[in-house]
Image: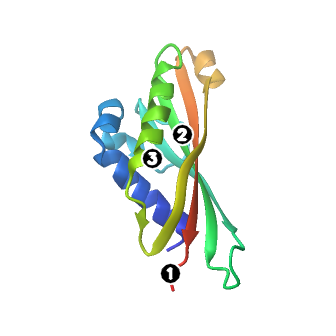
Amino acid sequence: MSAALALQKTLRAALTADEAFAALIPPANVFDRHGRPERFPCVEIGEAQEVLADLTWDRRHTAVYLTLHAWDCAPGLTGVKRTGEAIRNVVRTMNVDVAPYRCLDLKVRAIRTWRDKDGQESGDQISHGVVQIEALMEDPV
C-alpha cells in the first residue's frame, strides 16, 4: 500500500470517528470519488502526491501531500470554514499510527475557501474549501 493511501485511510477513519467533525459532516458524506458531490455538506478525499524525502542515506522517507475538498450548499463560506477548522483539529489530535508506515510529522499546511462559480450559474449557492495536509512518512523496514 502506498504511503498516500495509508494516510488517506487513517485520516478518513479519524474524521468519521470524531464527534465534533461528525456533527458537521455525516460519516457517510466523507468519500473518495470524482466530480461535484450530490450530497451536502461533504468532504471529498482528493488528490495526493508522494515525494521522496532524502533525509537519510537509506532513503526510507516520503513526504505525502493530501488534499481534502469541503463542500456545502449554503449562502456564505461559514460551513466550509468550520469544516476546515474541524479537519485541522482532528489532524492536530489524531493518533499518527499509519500502518505499515511510521508517521513522523503530520499537519494541515493550508485551508482555502471560495464560492463555487459553477453553482452560482445554476442557481445553487455552493461553497468549496480545500484543506492541504502534509505528512512525513517513514517506510516500513
Q: How many other residues sit within 10 Å of disc 2, few (<14), some (14-19) or many (≥20)?
A: many
Q: Which of marks 3 and 1 is nearer the N terminus?
A: 3
Is there any visible trace of residue 83 in the rendered image? yes
Q: Mark 3 points at which residue?
A: 92
Amino acid on which disc 3 is placed: Arg
- Checking the image for residue 140, the label placed there is 1
* 59 lies above or below 129: below
Please name whichever residue, 14 or 95, is drawn nearer the observer in this view of the structure.
95
Q: What secondary structure is marked by label 2?
A: strand
- Checking the image for residue 69, the label placed there is 2
Q: Earlier in the sequence, mark 2 or mark 1?
A: 2
* 110 lies above or below 133: above
Q: How many other residues sit within 10 Å of disc 1, few (<14), some (14-19) or many (≥20)?
A: few
Residue 141 x, y percent position in the rendering: 51, 86
Residue 54 x, y percent position in the rendering: 72, 74
Amino acid on which disc 1 is placed: Pro
The image quadrant that residue 100 belongs to is: bottom left
The residues tagged by marks 3 and 2 sit, at their Cα atoms, a distance apart of 18 Å
So how many labels did they put on this image? 3
Q: Does the residue at mark 3 contact the one at mark 2 (Cβ under 8 Å)? A: no
Q: Nearer the viewer, mark 3 or mark 2?
A: 3
Residue 8 x, y percent position in the rendering: 47, 58
Amino acid on which disc 2 is placed: His
| Residue drawn at x 60%, y 16% as measured from the top left | 120
| Residue drawn at x 50%, y 66% as measured from the top left | 103
Residue 62 x, y percent position in the rendering: 63, 69
| Residue drawn at x 40%, y 33% as measured from the top left | 39
Please name whichever residue, 129 or 95, is drawn nearer the observer in this view of the structure.
95
